[in-house]
Amino acid sequence: MKLIPSEEMALIAEKVIRDVPELNWLQESELSIGFYYSEKTKKSKGLITNGECRIPTGVYESFVPYDFIIIFYASATYFTQKQKEILMEHELSHIGIKNGKRYIVPHDFTDFKSIVDKYGSRWAEEVEE
Ligand SMILES: [Zn+2]
């Protein structure tokens, strides 16, 4: 897979880290994050993968001098600026560190699109008084 370093993505990340309170901690952290674009269209379980956050391991580790890398795949090229920012917020939310060890924060949420469209993503937290 060919990865192209992306200055555009780095600028988006800078903005998102500054603007999203949950991600502000990254400003003070020592973590280094690499931003790459891939011309590949990625699919996983039949669904298009727009982006990915990973910890470079194995062969990547020798070429990629970062603690984490964030990749945007070809499908994200057609995103609006706002969509790119949301995708970036998603990928940055995967960055985790515990006792000095890097890890990928798993998704905390699984649902059907039809349910989210109708009731929002926090439907389970709403309690009628
Ligand atoms: Zn994700």
Image: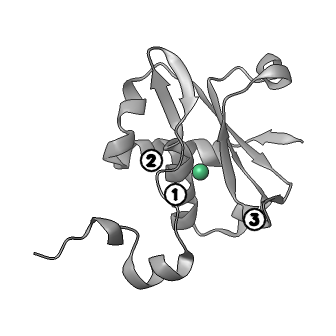
Rendering quarter of residue 119: bottom left
Residue type beneath disc 2 = Lys
First-in-chain label (1 vs 3): 3
**Front residue (pair 57, 40):** 57
Rendering quarter of residue 23: top left
Q: Are marks 1 and 3 in contact (CB under 8 Å)?
A: no
Q: Residue at x 52, y 35 (%)?
A: 95
**Front residue (pair 118, 21):** 118
Percent x, y of residue 16: 44, 48
Q: CA distance from mark 2 to mark 3?
A: 25 Å
Q: Residue at x 75, y 65 (%)?
A: 48
Label 3's element?
A: strand
Crowd class of label 3 (few under 14; some 14 to 19; many from 20; radius 10 Å): some
Q: Is residue 48 above or below residue 2?
A: below
Q: Is residue 53 above or below residue 126?
A: above
**Front residue (pair 10, 40):** 40
Residue type beneath disc 3 = Ile
Q: Are marks 2 and 1 in contact (CB under 8 Å)?
A: yes
Q: Is mark 2 within 8 Å of ligand 1?
A: no
Q: Residue at x 59, y 69 (%)?
A: 80
Tag of residue 15:
2
Taking the view exactly as shown, the residue that stands out farthest to the left is 129
User: Which numbered disc, 2 or 3, marks the residue closer to the eye?
Assistant: 3
User: Which numbered disc, 1 or 3, marks the residue closer to the eye?
Assistant: 3
In the picture of the structure, the residue carrying the numbered disc 1 is 85
Q: Is residue 35 above or below residue 57?
A: below
Residue type beneath disc 1 = Glu
Crowd class of label 1 (few under 14; some 14 to 19; many from 20; radius 10 Å): some
Taking the view exactly as shown, the residue that stands out farthest to the right is 1
Label 1's element?
A: helix
Q: CA distance from mark 1 to mark 3?
A: 18 Å
In the picture of the structure, the residue carrying the numbered disc 3 is 48
